[in-house]
Amino acid sequence: MDYSKIKEEFAKYGLEFPDSLKGEGLTEEQKQEINPCGTFCGKCDDYGVTCDGCRNRQGLPLWQQMFGNTTPCHYYDCSAKKGFHDCSQCDKLPCPEYFSYPDPDMSIEYKQWWFRLRMNNLKKSNCNCKVEVMDTYEENVIRYLGDEK
C-alpha cells in the first residue's frame, strides 16, 4: 500500500504518522496505552504532554476537539459499559462504528489503513480476537456491515 496519501491526511492536521505496534502481543504498559478502539497512544507525540489518551480522559481524546465533538468516544463508552478493557473482547467487533469517521473528506485509503491498524492492535491486545481484515476498505464494509451500510 502507498502510504503517501495517508501521510498527507495526517499532515493536513499537523499530525505525525504513527506506527502500528510491532511484534506479537502487548506489554502491560502498552495495554494501558491502547485505546478501546485499538488506537495506540504510546506512539503519539502528544501522549503524556498535551493528552493522556482516550482511556485516561474518560473517552474524550484530544483529537475529538478537532471536530468539535464533546461527547465521549463511542468505543470508550461502549467498552466501559460492558466492562471490557477494549473492543477486542467484544463478539461484535468490528461494529458499525468502525466504519464511521468524523472527517467527511477522509480518503478511502486512509480509512482502510486506520481500520487495519486498529484491528491489528486489538488482535495483539487479545490473542483470542480473530477479526479478519480484507484487502480493501470496500471489502471490509461489505463483510462486516453487509446490508447495514
Image (tube, rainbow, N blue to C red):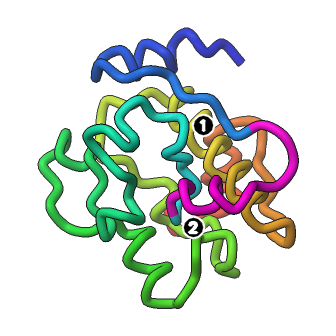
x, y percentage for residue 69?
17, 55
- In-image side of 8 versus 50 (left or right): right
- Check disc 1 and report the residue beneath it: 112
Q: Which of marks 2 and 1 is nearer the N terminus?
A: 1
**Amino acid type indicated by mark 2:** Asp
Point 60% across, 45% down: residue: 115
- In-image side of 133 versus 55 (left or right): right
Point 62% across, 65% down: residue: 94
Q: How crowded is mark 2: few (under 14 residues within 10 Å), some or many (20 or more)?
A: few
User: Which region shows up in magenta?
Assistant: 22-35
Q: Determine which of the numbered discs, if any, sits on residue 128 in the image.
A: none
Camera-nearest residue between 67 and 81: 81
x, y percentage for residue 73?
33, 65
x, y percentage for residue 61?
30, 53
- Classify 43 as above or below 142: above
x, y percentage for residue 77?
37, 77
Q: Give how far apart the Cα atoms at labels 2 and 1 are.
A: 19 Å
Q: Assign a secondary structure to mark 2.
A: helix
Point 53% across, 89% down: residue: 83
Extreme-bottom residue of the structure: 82
- Classify 145 as above or below 17: below
Mark 2 or 1, closer to the camera = 1
Say if residue 146 shows up in the picture. no
- Check disc 2 and report the residue beneath it: 147
**Amino acid type indicated by mark 1:** Gln
Camera-nearest residue between 115 and 96: 115
